[in-house]
Image: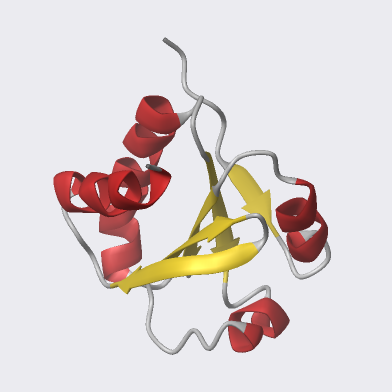
Amino acid sequence: MMGAEIITLTDQNFNAHLKDAELPVFVDFWAGWCGPCKMLAPVIEELAQDYGQRIQIAKLNVDENRETAEKFGILSIPTMILFKEGNEVTRITGFRPKREIARFIDEHLA
């Protein structure tokens, strides 16, 4: 089964995207200079393939979109937040192996 594409979020489209999302949205807050973020990128791509029909996977560059990063109090990256119906459900910070992130997602999809 093909997964969904990874959506790029910005300060301009973040609120509208969350408001209009029919599925839960898993957002990776990252930056290009962040080593753990670079390590996490292929994991995020695999998760998009695995969960593409059940959640939306999105990324937001915190350097280019400071307003949204500040709104959600992103102090460390990578930070991953799962939103349902536009509201934050839970978050994890720092690099995690795929199985741990999948368990994190699965706990909140049920």
Q: Is residue 79 visible?
A: no
Residue at x-position 65% and y-position 55%:
85
- Counting from the top left corner in percent of width and height, residue 59 is at 54, 55
On screen, 46 above or below 59?
above
In the rendering, at what x and y percent does residue 32 appear?
Answer: 46, 66
Side of 74 where 77 appears, left or right? left
Q: Is residue 20 above or below residue 11?
A: above
Q: Indicate whether 51 appears above or below 44.
A: above
Indicate the quadrant where residue 10 lies: bottom right
Q: Is residue 100 left or right of residue 93?
A: left
- Side of 22 where 24 appears, left or right: left
| x and y percentages locating residue 26 in the rendered image | 49, 52
Q: Which residue occupies 49% across, 31% down?
A: 54
Q: Tell me, what colour scheme is on the image? A: secondary structure
Q: Quadrant of the C terminus?
A: top left
Q: Residue furthest front?
A: 110
Residue visible at 54% across and 27% down in the picture: 4
Residue 7 spot, x, y in % from top left: 62, 44
The residue positioned 19% from the left and 60% from the top of the image is 96
Q: Is residue 88 visible?
A: yes
Nearest the viewer among 37 and 29 is 29
Residue 42 appears in which quarter of the rendering?
Answer: top left
